[in-house]
């Protein structure tokens, strides 16, 4: 911990502390305030004074108290032991804090993010004399039962060059994170000792070799997303919605079911009980892709709404840095930030305390820049070690009053390429996920169609178009119905309403609590979409031949379609083909009956 | 360096309770004192006027040349030269004890019912500390309120924070009193106590609650913190904190199931705005300070349960939506923090329906884990889902009917209208002393659904239809 006094407290105004008598301090330097050693960060320097944003409650801080420097920026500690841990916004392990300070988080408690006593099974991948560069893997450690932690040559410690020779490397065996495991010699001949721990400043993106185009979907198992508004691995999406529209539920569903290797879940300024819910549920739930406990691929960052506001501001950066670290090891990481509006509000609150000139609705003028910087850290990349990895960002937005025209939603929209707008009227009718098919969009559709073609499912693109087209026609028809009632429409148009209503009930809605429905494999999704479109094609053909709509609607098989999401499980997808055949047969028979 | 720090703390000990005569500036509830010893942020302050009356205050901003102090009881009658300001060297604390049950206190936790308060069992800081998310126990115990629309559709769970979004002139007080009187957790009746915080409400509102609790015989299990409409508005910012501090003591140290009723949160927020404006802070929406969300969260997040402790804090904040506007910052930010909301509907009220709760925007986020088999009844989740879905369709049909006339509706739409009426008159509507069991509530829900044909009921299972549906 920092021991050099760099100044003294001049003024305390909530989480903003003015420090006087500064001798040696840098912007964004991590500092410790007063006798409690509260953690803070320098955000403004002016002559001999500095303004510090403090990450803890400042009650009791007195002018005249000493301020200690650390001569490093606010950083995270990286190494094995991150997965499965729950951290606060500045990477303090909450379980450990509980042991130290009890059920409430006391001021000034500190514990290193990585456990120092645990021993990890270390396997070296390099031998003495090997040449190695920054970002290369020099050893592996099994972090959970299926995630291998790859130890990389850190970029930032030695500034002397990019390539090194291995001078010494520990033998395979068990080591703690702070034991020296490798020594490198740089080109000038100087030696650098490595442990399993490295550090990275949270506000600085980690470097990569190359950024790639986004062509692989992130499969979420949620039909409305995968089929209509897909997200690519390395992509960015915003989920805006008023309270109670299911932002958190959607985020949880994706965290549970998506096919990323690692999940970083940031509870930023949200409810304490929601984090408890995740903590309680995830260890028990099984990851559908690896068959292991979900907690074995999840990192939680909890900075609930009653925890200090500046740590809320930092939590987003802490999360994305951890995500990038695992990306650099060659993993696909999905990051959920719930909610970025709380982060923006933290920026606003701090900006107000710093007495900065406000722009729109009191938000600082640099809000769009910060949002852009954050989303720009997503991407699918070739890492410096030559692996492929990605970070996808799924950011919830909580617009005040559910009004999407407010600054955070609007600016976020500029920097994301996928948008899942949540609709209050859908949520009121308990249509979940309440993703509106009219407001939402995904710019990844074209880029991903190639992937589907390679899978032999190129039909997805056309079927999606067809369904979207029907949904848009339905909206226009609904307007007519509102004026004159459904009876005024011809059967052919009423059938569009019927098919769309079936599509909404049987396909777009998904029950997060149903065994069969909560996760839907893409094969089942395609099958279901196909059944509904068959119903539309054969049904409308039959109606155009003069068959009354009532007869088509009353077919027994329609009830079966309505319940297929519950009745057919993922292991039993052939059942969908049989359903399709029954549908064809019944319509055919109906047509015959009517003709005779 | 350690020595210096020690010196500092010795110095601070000596400076504790140092008093200054004369202040430099008074503005609204704020006092500015120049050139003091180093004063801690958030420190408790006693302010004495020239007649010797003591008022409590808190340090809002501290620096080496000026200290801003915020008074909780108003600044009327204070003058610059003879006002004495005493810095107590510690933050605002409240002596709490179970003996405060059955007593009436002001917003600062001082007695106003003519008898001294019992000695505190513990002295606690009124700001509380955030509960570590890993220490929280996920709330899942169903509270039966005896009100159908709550128990059936927006179930209250022990440890939940569920606000009532109401409007002026709507019966939110009646409902809050009814819930307080009837709420039971099966098997735990005796341990339930109530902490009541009134912020800026009129005396007759407070009286209504006192009378209602007297009539039902629970008065000695209620602690009142009253900061009435004619008390200084600034006191309201402390009232809920005092109340929650006692609630935390009762729940987590004493093991009680505590129900905290806070009315009216709108007044609380307005006091915050008042102080913020006086301090010249940059306002955000509608003039409310940018930290309104964090500030409300500090209150609401003090509810819940803690692993290994038997008590719980359930919050029932009441707020009147200005102009019935749910997108106003106060209900809006509240809704983002609380675990659901109960929304009153003026139209239902004018139709004589009590409680006038609009089921569609109302929501209980925690109900999913507290209902169903073994907790309420196995058909509860699907039934609630079905009632929501059908009732939301009723709204569409009513809109349609208002355009094309009821005669033009199809048969099925007519059935929906009948269902809507039955749902509102039989299921939602009840008397304010009617205590329905959960079985009664669910049966009434099925009864309303009997107006609809079974093929419309897609959210319930075949089995449930067979057992409960008699249409």
Image: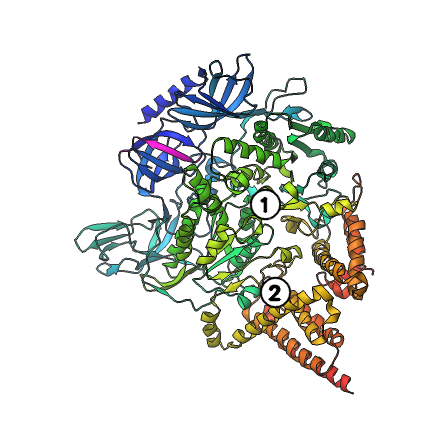
For the magenta stretch, what is the residue range?
A: A14-23
Q: Position of residue B323 (x, y in %)?
A: 65, 42
Q: Is residue A115 left or right of residue A516?
A: left
In the rendered image, residues at marks 1 and 2 fall on the same chain: no
Q: Position of residue A547 (x, y in %)?
A: 74, 80
Q: How many marks?
A: 2
Around disc 2, counting alpha carbons within 10 Å, would you say few (fewer than 14), some (14 to 19), or many (20 or more)? many
Residue A22 is a magenta residue? yes
Q: Which residue is mark 1?
A: B332
Q: Dot 1: few (<14), some (14–19), or many (≥20) neighbours within 10 Å?
A: many
Q: CA distance from mark 1 to mark 2?
A: 28 Å
Left or right of A283? Residue B176 is right
Hey, which quadrant is residue A144 in on the image? bottom left
The single residue placed furthest to the top in the displayed view is B51
Residue at screen point 63% across, 42% down: B160
Q: Is residue A253 magenta?
A: no
Determine the secondary structure under disc 1: helix
Residue B290 position within the rendered picture, expressed as x and y whole percent measured from the top left: 50, 40
Q: Nearer the viewer, residue B197 or B55?
A: B55
Chain of the residue that carries numbered disc 2 in the rendered image: A
Residue nearest the observer in this picture, A268 or A574: A268
Q: Which residue is mark 2?
A: A508
Which residue is found at the position 48% from the left and 37% from the top? A105
The reply to whether callout 1 and callout 2 are in contact (CB within 8 Å) is no
At mark 2, the secondary structure is helix
Residue B394 can be seen, yes or no? yes
Q: Nearer the viewer, residue A205 or B291?
A: B291
- Say if residue B321 shows up in the picture: no
């Amino acid at each position: 911990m920092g021991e050099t006094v760099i100044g003294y407290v001049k003024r305390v105004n909530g989480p903003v502390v003015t420090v006087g008598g500064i001798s040696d301090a840098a912007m964004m330097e991590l500092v410790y305030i007063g006798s409690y050693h509260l953690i803070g960060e320098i955000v403004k320097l002016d002559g001999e004074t500095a303004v510090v944003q403090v990450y803890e409650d400042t009650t009791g801080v007195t002018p005249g108290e000493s301020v200690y420097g650390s001569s490093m920026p606010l950083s995270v500690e990286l190494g094995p032991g991150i997965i499965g841990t729950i951290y606060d916004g500045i990477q303090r392990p909450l379980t450990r804090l509980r042991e130290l300070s009890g059920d409430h988080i006391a001021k000034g408690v500190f514990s290193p993010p990585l456990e120092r006593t645990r021993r990890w099974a270390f396997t070296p991948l390099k031998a003495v004399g090997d040449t190695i560069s920054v970002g290369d893997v020099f050893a592996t450690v099994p972090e959970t039962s299926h995630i291998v932690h790859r130890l990389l040559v850190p970029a930032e410690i030695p500034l002397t060059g990019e390539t090194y020779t291995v001078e010494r490397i520990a033998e395979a065996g068990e080591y703690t994170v702070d034991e020296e495991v490798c020594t490198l010699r740089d080109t000038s001949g100087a030696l650098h000792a490595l442990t399993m721990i490295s550090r990275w400043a949270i506000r600085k993106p980690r470097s990569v070799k190359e950024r790639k185009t986004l062509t692989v979907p992130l499969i979420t198992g949620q039909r409305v997303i995968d089929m209509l508004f897909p997200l690519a691995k390395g992509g960015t999406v915003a989920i805006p919605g008023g309270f109670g529209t299911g932002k958190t539920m959607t985020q949880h569903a994706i965290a549970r079911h998506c096919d990323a290797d690692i999940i970083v879940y940031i509870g930023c300024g949200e409810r304490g009980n929601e984090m408890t819910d995740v903590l309680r549920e995830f260890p028990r739930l099984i990851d559908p892709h690896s068959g292991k406990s979900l907690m074995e691929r999840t990192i939680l960052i909890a900075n609930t709404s009653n925890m200090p506001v500046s740590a809320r501001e930092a939590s987003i950066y802490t999360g994305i840095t951890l995500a990038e670290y695992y990306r650099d090891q060659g993993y696909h990481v999905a990051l959920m930030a719930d909610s970025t509006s709380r982060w923006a509000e933290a920026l606003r609150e701090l900006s107000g305390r710093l007495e900065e000139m406000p722009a729109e609705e009191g938000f600082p003028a640099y809000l769009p820049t910060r949002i852009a910087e954050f989303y720009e850290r997503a991407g699918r990349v070739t890492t410096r070690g030559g692996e492929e990895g990605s970070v996808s960002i799924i950011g919830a937005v909580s617009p005040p009053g559910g009004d999407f025209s407010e600054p955070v939603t609007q600016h976020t929209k500029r920097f994301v390429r996928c948008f899942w707008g949540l609709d209050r009227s859908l949520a009121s009718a308990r249509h979940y996920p309440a993703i509106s098919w009219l407001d939402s969009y995904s710019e990844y559709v074209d880029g991903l169609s190639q992937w589907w073609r390679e899978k032999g499912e190129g039909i997805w693109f056309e079927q999606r178009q067809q369904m979207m087209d029907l949904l848009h026609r339905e909206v226009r028809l609904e307007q007519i119905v509102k004026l004159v009632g459904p009876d005024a429409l011809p059967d052919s148009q009423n059938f569009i309403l019927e098919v769309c209503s079936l599509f909404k009930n049987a396909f777009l809605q998904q029950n997060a609590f149903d065994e069969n429905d909560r996760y839907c494999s893409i094969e089942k999704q395609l099958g279901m979409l196909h059944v509904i479109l068959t119903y539309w094609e054969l049904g409308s053909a039959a109606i155009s031949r003069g068959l009354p709509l009532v007869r088509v609607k009353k077919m027994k098989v329609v009830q079966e379609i309505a319940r297929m999401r519950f009745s057919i499980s993922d292991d039993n997808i052939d059942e969908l083909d049989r359903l399709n055949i029954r549908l064809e047969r019944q319509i055919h028979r109906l047509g015959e009956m009517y003709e005779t | 360096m350690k020595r210096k720090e020690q010196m500092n703390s010795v110095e601070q000990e000596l400076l504790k309770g140092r008093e200054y005569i004369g202040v430099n500036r008074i503005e609204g509830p704020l006092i500015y004192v120049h050139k003091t010893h180093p004063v801690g942020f958030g420190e408790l302050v006693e302010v004495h006027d020239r007649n010797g009356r003591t008022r409590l205050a808190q340090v809002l901003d501290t620096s080496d040349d000026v200290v801003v102090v915020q008074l909780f009881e108003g600044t009327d009658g204070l003058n610059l030269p003879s006002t004495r300001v005493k810095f107590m060297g510690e933050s605002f604390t409240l002596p709490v004890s179970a003996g405060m049950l059955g007593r009436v206190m002001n917003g600062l936790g001082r007695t106003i019912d003519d008898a001294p308060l019992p000695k505190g069992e513990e002295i606690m800081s009124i700001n509380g500390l955030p509960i570590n998310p890993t220490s929280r126990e996920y709330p899942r115990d169903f509270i039966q309120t005896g009100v159908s629309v709550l128990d059936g559709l927006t179930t209250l769970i022990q440890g939940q924070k569920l606000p009532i979004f109401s409007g002026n002139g709507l019966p939110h007080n009646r409902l809050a009193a009814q819930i307080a009187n009837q709420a039971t957790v099966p098997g735990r009746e005796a341990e339930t106590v109530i902490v009541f915080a009134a912020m800026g409400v009129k005396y007759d509102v407070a009286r209504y609650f006192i009378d209602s609790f007297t009539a039902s015989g629970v008065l000695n299990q209620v602690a009142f913190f009253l900061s009435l409409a004619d008390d200084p508005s600034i006191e309201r910012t402390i009232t809920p904190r005092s109340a929650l501090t006692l609630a935390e003591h009762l729940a987590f140290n004493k093991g009680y199931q505590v129900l905290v009723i806070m009315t009216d949160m709108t007044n609380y927020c307005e006091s915050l705005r008042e102080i913020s404006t006086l301090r010249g802070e940059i306002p955000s929406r509608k003039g409310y300070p940018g930290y309104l969300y964090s500030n409300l969260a500090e209150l609401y997040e003090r509810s819940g349960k803690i692993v290994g402790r038997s008590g719980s804090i359930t919050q029932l904040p009441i707020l009147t939506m200005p102009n019935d506007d749910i997108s106003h910052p106060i209900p809006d930010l509240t809704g983002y923090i609380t675990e659901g909301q109960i929304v009153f509907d003026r139209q239902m009220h004018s139709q004589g329906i009590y409680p006038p709760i609009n089921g569609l925007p109302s929501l209980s986020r925690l109900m999913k884990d507290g209902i169903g088999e073994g907790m309420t009844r196995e058909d509860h989740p699907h039934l609630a889902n079905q009632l929501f879905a059908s009732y939301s369709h009723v709204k569409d049909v009513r809109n349609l009917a208002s355009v094309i006339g009821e005669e033009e509706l199809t048969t099925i739409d007519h059935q929906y209208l009948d269902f809507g009426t039955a749902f509102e008159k039989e299921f939602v509507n009840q008397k304010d002393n009617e205590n329905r069991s959960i079985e009664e509530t669910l049966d009434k829900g099925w009864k309303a659904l009997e107006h609809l044909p079974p093929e419309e009921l897609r959210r319930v299972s075949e089995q449930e239809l067979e057992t409960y549906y008699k249409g």
